[in-house]
């Protein structure tokens, strides 16, 4: 097939999606809000894991085996917090870069002479 025919087929398939841009924006906003909710809940969970490890570390101060297990819980809590912070930062970067959620993308202007 020629390039013109392929282009016209692609346009006829994609035009209905482009016509419902408002629906796509609401879907993207819903996905963004859901992702923020999930990341927030996982932040809370990772904090609770860290705090539970801290409580066990203090409570079992005389048992080296239990202290090691509690230290492991604290480390996993810290890792979870770091992963969630990175995930939140990446999503916020993508949201601002692509201008999702009615926020226009910001670009750096070149210096004027």
Image (spheres, rainbow, N blue to C red):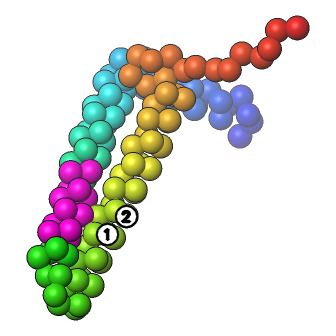
- Quadrant where the C terminus sits is top right
Q: Residue at x 37, y 26 (%)?
A: 24
The relative height of residue 56 versus residue 25 in the rendered view (above or below) is below
> Which residue is under mark 1?
76
- CA neighbours of label 1 inside 10 A, class few (<14), some (14 to 19), many (20+): some
Question: How many labels were placed on the picture?
Answer: 2
**Which of these two is toward me, 39 or 9?**
39
Q: Residue at x 29, y 47 (%)?
A: 39
**Most distant residue in the right direction:** 113
Whole-Å distance between the Cαs marked 2 and 1?
5 Å
Q: Position of residue 59 (x, y in %)?
A: 11, 76
Disc number placed over residue 11 in the picture, else none: none
Q: Residue at x 30, y 42 (%)?
A: 35
Q: Does the stretch in magenta take in 49?
A: yes
Q: Position of residue 65 (x, y in %)?
A: 22, 91
Disc number placed over residue 79 in the picture, else none: 2
Q: Which residues are magenta?
A: 43-55
Q: Is residue 38 visible?
A: no
**Which of these two is toward me, 76 or 60?**
60
Q: Residue at x 57, y 26 (%)?
A: 11
Q: What's the magenta bit mostly, secondary-structure-wise?
A: helix
- Quarter holding residue 50: bottom left
The relative height of residue 27 versus residue 105 in the rendered view (above or below) is below
- Quadrant where the N terminus sits is top right
The relative height of residue 12 versus residue 91 in the rendered view (above or below) is above
């Amino acid at each position: 097939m020629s390039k013109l025919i392929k282009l016209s087929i692609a346009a006829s398939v994609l035009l209905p999606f482009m016509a419902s841009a408002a629906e796509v924006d609401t879907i993207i906003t819903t996905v963004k809000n859901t992702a923020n909710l999930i990341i927030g809940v996982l932040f809370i969970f990772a904090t609770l894991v860290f705090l539970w490890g801290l409580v066990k570390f203090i409570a079992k101060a005389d048992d080296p085996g239990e202290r090691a297990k509690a230290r492991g819980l604290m480390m996993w809590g810290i890792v979870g917090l770091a992963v969630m912070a990175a995930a939140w930062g990446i999503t916020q970067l993508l949201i601002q870069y692509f201008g999702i959620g009615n926020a226009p993308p910001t670009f750096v202007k070149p210096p004027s002479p």
